[in-house]
Image: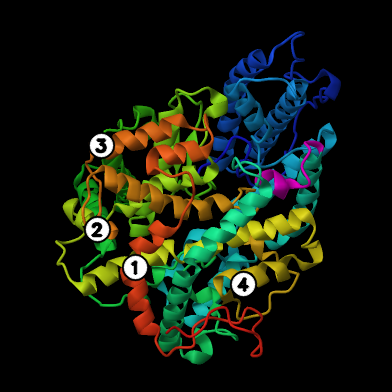
Amino acid sequence: MKPRIALLALAVAGSLAITGCKREPTPPSAAPGAPAAAPAGETADEFVARVNIEFRAISAELNSAQWLSNTYINGDSEMLAAKANERWLTQLNAWIAQARRFEGQQLSPETARAIKLIKLMTAMPAPKDPALLQELTRIATRMEGTYGAGKYCTGAGEATNCRDIGQLSEVLAKNRDYDAQLEAWQGWHTISQPMRKDYIRFAELVNTGAKEMGFADAGEMWRSGYDMSPAELAAESDRLWDQVKPLYEQLHCYARGKLDATYGKDKGQVAGGMLPAHLMGNLWQQDWGNLWDLMQPYPGAGSLDVNSALQKLAQDNLALELDKPGNPGASEAESTFTAQRAAELATAKAMTVRAQDFYVSLGMPKLPDSYWEKSQFIQPLDRDVVCHASAWDMNMAGDVRTKMCIKPNEEELTTIYHELGHIYYDLAYNSQPPVFQAGAHDGFHEAIGDTIVLAMTPKYLASVGLVGEQQQSQEALVNAQMRMALAKVSFLPFGLMIDRWRWGVFDGSIKPDAYNKAWWELKAKYQGVAPVTARGEEFFDAGAKYHVPGNTPYTRYFLSHVLQFQFYKALCDTAGHKGPLYECSFYGSKAAGEKYWAMLSKGASQPWPKTMKEITGGEKMDASAVLEYFAPLQGWLKQQNAGSACGWNPSGGAAAATVATTPA
């Protein structure tokens, strides 16, 4: 995930306790750092040049406050983040107001684009009223903090047992006990209930800000950042979904059969043929990779057990640390604990070095020393932190970092490859003016690292020692494709439905008294998943997904899952690959790296269709490369599903039409 400049940092909700002498607050009219008035006679070109200077300065301050509130969650960091965001949004509102002077003027294409991007810099449009702006930033920080510090607790007193998102996710990933999974899934969804009231008010406030900027609502503003009209973006995402939906439906049908076989038909599916939400190996059903033990078509064919290699790496690092001389005054338990922590950090950094190696093999630079010094690689023990993986460009000039709590498993490894895609995009466009230091559109940013992940073919994994030598066979191919589909194909409808929910919230078609009902209706429609127990309006299940309280637009992730296959195909062609697309790894191709870096360096300086054409030869987003890549798996799935009643009834009623028909 790539945090953008106006997304609030995560911080725990709390209040400041004031002790000692009480200092009177500075009156708002005398507040330092208020936005300066525009110079008299300033031209549009001069305005953009000034904004670029001011933007760079304020972004460094804001990113530092956000980083602090992500890595030291407490009331103090919450206050710092909220106040930094107040200053940022006040400054942004001032720029937007000042930019109106140039409406209707003849501007250079570069200046006109810069002014347009300034207006769209935030996903959280703030009201002009300072009191409402302050309320907005505090609510947003509080919601994110509630998520970041969220734990599910059982018992009381000394018997209290609390589990965080990592521990609950581990249950869904590895424990195949039906009831244990249900408890973990339901437990995590309790953390979002306190956010419901805040989110209702949050939606009202961002809508006020969006309307003051000239948009119908915040959702329309979000859809305006794609060099096309908001209506065209909605239609375009529907078109892309229609391309890939048949493939998802086949994967859904196969998964249902496997769940039926594992848990029994009475538990393996929900009424209407939908998949039980708590059995998909993931808290939000967005990635089914943890179901590999159930879904693997041909056990043992083309071993892709990356986890074993990473666990061996962790064990070897622990052995090395245990062999080092310890503190003479420390107990055996203390020495062992110190060695374990050092080994965890060494393993996390080694996994990151492995990911860096792919980018360097393409001719890209090594990460700066400051990256290794300042990034969060493992979860600290002395404070609450946000473990949700993210990539950070702190100062638009090379201070880049990632924030993770890395564990030695395949999912975490591929996440590192993904996050470094953001980092290398940042480094490539750092030469651009600050206003243009962004992705061609936000889906581009999310696709960069995942394009590299597609090139992590079985042969590549074997070449770097993460799996054994691969034997070519049809069974091994199907296994490899299934492994990738469980991550990529399963995600597609999830990537679409989150913003469909928020667009409805923002435009008023989804009312506060139907938040949860609408959430599960959309999950049923797009994903074909459902909860096995009632989820009434006392819950706020949307808030159990980070990007909702974090206010991160999500259509970008759906688009990225299309774009990454387009980019992958283009880079494979550049690398001179011959043969089926799914066999291509452009690891080590300087020609592919040069083409990729050239695209990354453009940032947001030109409309994305032009950037798209430079790398792919075409100006449209298109899912045909997804279908080309997964053609062997789709054919295999149709054979496996033959005779099954595929599809699902979104309403759960027997009379309703199913989404898909029985495959031919």
Q: Are marks 1 and 2 in contact (CB under 8 Å)?
A: no
> Taking 246 as reference, is 120 left or right?
right
Percent across and percent down for residue 161 are 55, 66
3D distance between C-alphas at marks 1 and 2: 12 Å
Badge 4 is on which residue? 525
**Above or below: residue 393 compared with residue 649:** above
Q: Are marks 4 and 3 in contact (CB under 8 Å)?
A: no
Task: Between residue 235 and residue 541, name the one nearer to us.
Answer: 235
Q: Residue at x 32, y 51 (%)?
A: 340
Residue type indicated by callout 2? Glu
Which numbered disc covers residue 631? 1
Which numbered disc covers residue 591? 3
Residue type indicated by callout 1? Ala
Which numbered disc covers residue 583? 2
Task: Between residue 609 and residue 551, name the one nearer to us.
Answer: 609
Residue type indicated by callout 4? Lys
Q: Kindly report which numbered mark, 1 or 2, lies closer to the viewer in this rendering.
A: 1
Disc 2 crowd rating (10 Å Cα; few below 14, some 14-19, many 20+) is some
